[in-house]
Amino acid sequence: MKNRVLTSLILLLVVVCAPVLSASPAFYLIPDSTVVFRDSLFDVLMPVDAASVNLKAFSVEISFDRNVIRTDSLSVTEGYLLPTSSLPTFFWVGFSPDSSKLFIDGAILGDGFTVSGSGTLANIRFYTIGFGESNLEFTSIRARNGDNEPLIYDAVDGWVKVCQFVGDVNADNRITISDVVYMINWIFGGGPEPIPDQFVGDVNCDMTANVSDVVYLINYIFAGGPAPCGPCY
Ligand SMILES: [Ca+2]
Ligand SMILES: [Ca+2]
């Protein structure tokens, strides 16, 4: 009997405490993973979740690989959440000198006024400049409530991969006759290897790049043959 009472008490504690334990608010980057081609744009939202309470101001620092993606101050715009207070807001965007960190500050201009619940704080448009992968990482999150007290938020980071077309062996972001010439020069003329390595030239996906891939590529470009086996390298 004693054990049953104890078990019931523990169960009650778990039920009561579970929402509290899982209620830690967080800043997100949505989508948390993006696969995109080079020389293109992609959008990332920066929301907070429903556990966010009495948010008046925030200041975040997001780092990324500047050799893979970039953004600029015109491409970062205010989200809808703080303006739902119906008061004027402050919104500022800055960058580290080497362009590898993005700083975003926002606040409701009005003593004591706050917003609670989920919503977007910023919209960020990145452009891709190089092949590879980059984390989108919150390296700092600071937030304040209406009494100017610090609020604690978790961070849910993002990630992006900038892809290369399979068959784009000269890495100019398109598949053309110049890739065929490049492949022929590599295979028969001792020219440079496909960039970044030979597997980007394996357009028929048989795990090796050779003359049969050249034939496949010619057939694709000039005769309406099947496309390279995978769109992304
Ligand atoms: Ca190419
Ligand atoms: Ca092949």
Image (tube, rainbow, N blue to C red):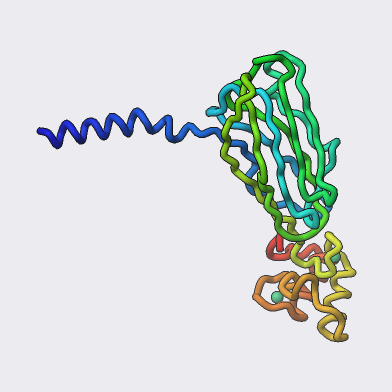
Residue 214, above or below 62: below
Percent of width and height locating residue 217: 79, 70
Quadrant location of residue 116?
A: top right
Ligand 2 resides in the quarter of the picture at bottom right
Residue 182, above or below 24: below
Residue 21, above or below 201: above
Q: Which residue is drawn at 73% across and 60% down?
A: 132
Percent of width and height locating residue 90: 77, 24
Percent of width and height locating residue 162: 74, 56
Q: Which residue is drawn at 77% across and 17% down?
A: 88
Q: In which quarter of the image is the C terminus?
A: bottom right
Residue 176, above or below 188: above
Nearest the eye: 40 or 140: 140
In the visual, does 223 lie left or right of 161? right
Nearest the eye: 8 or 149: 149
- Tell which residue pokes out farthest to the left in this image: 1
